Amino acid sequence: MYTLYYSPGAASLVVHWLLIEIGAKHELRKLDLPAGEHKRPEYLALNPNGVVPTLLVHGEPLTEAAALVLHLADVHPSFGLAPEPGSIERGRYYQWLLHLANTLQPAFRTWFYPGEAAGEEHAQAAKDLARERIEACWDRIEAHLAKRGPYLLGASASAADFHLTMLMRWSRNMPRPATDWPQLAALAQRMKARPSFRTLYEREGLTEWA
């Protein structure tokens, strides 16, 4: 039994999606981020960073979206969302997930909160740089998919593709959303066609980019 602290459309989305995909028993605890519920002492006791997601596993809190993606894929191996441990494909899986978490996701943080990164007087410059970094990531992934796709690891989807799809969704209102790249657009369509994606949107009350 899992308990997920989440906010609709936030970084918790990929964890919620995987819980649905693997059919794991779970309950949801929605946090109102604009109201600051993620900064209250009772939540900070679970997640000192004051962000979502937090996943309770047998009552013990785990945090960091990418770590939770890795954990769920490992704990539920029958769903084939991660390659065999020790294989070269497993190494590539780690490579892509960490690239998404360490390179692409922080650039989105700067895009959405440029003043946080550089101060309000430099916010536009920070936002412009974030856009360049995000689009450079799309260029790299597009080239990889064209050569070795249709998914990040080849013929079938892994947990890394779920994480990628969440980040692609975050770009939907940018000047060049991820779907401007043909291979990425095709991957997004395949992932959004999964029944678990429709259930995810219903549960989180999302409508855009459906």
Image: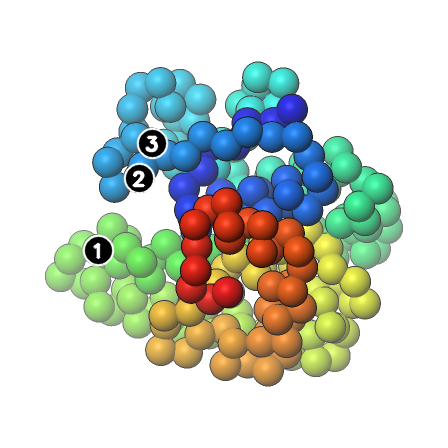
Kind of residue sitting beneath label 1: Gly
Secondary structure state at the residue bearing disc 1 = helix
Q: Position of residue 68 (x, y in %)?
A: 60, 38
Q: Quadrant of residue 189?
A: bottom right
Viewer-nearest of discs 1 and 3: 3
Secondary structure state at the residue bearing disc 3 = helix
The residue sitting at 73% across, 73% down in the picture is 150
Q: Quadrant of residue 118?
A: bottom left
Q: Quadrant of residue 144?
A: bottom right
- CA gap, disc 1 to disc 3? 21 Å
Q: Earlier in the sequence, mark 2 or mark 3?
A: 2
Q: Is residue 26 above or below residue 34?
A: above
Mark 1 Cα within 10 Å, few/some/many (few <14, many 20+)? some
The residue sitting at 55% across, 29% down in the picture is 27
Mark 2 and mark 3 in contact? Answer it, CB < 8 Å: yes
Mark 3 Cα within 10 Å, few/some/many (few <14, many 20+)? many
In the visual, does 8 lie left or right of 87?
Answer: left
Secondary structure state at the residue bearing disc 2 = loop
Q: Position of residue 15 (x, y in %)?
A: 57, 42
For disc 3, the marked residue is: 38
Residue 115 circle label: 1
Of residues 190 and 145, which is closer to you in this image? 190
Mark 2 Cα within 10 Å, few/some/many (few <14, many 20+)? some
In the visual, does 210 lie left or right of 73?
Answer: left
Kind of residue sitting beneath label 3: His
Residue 33 circle label: 2
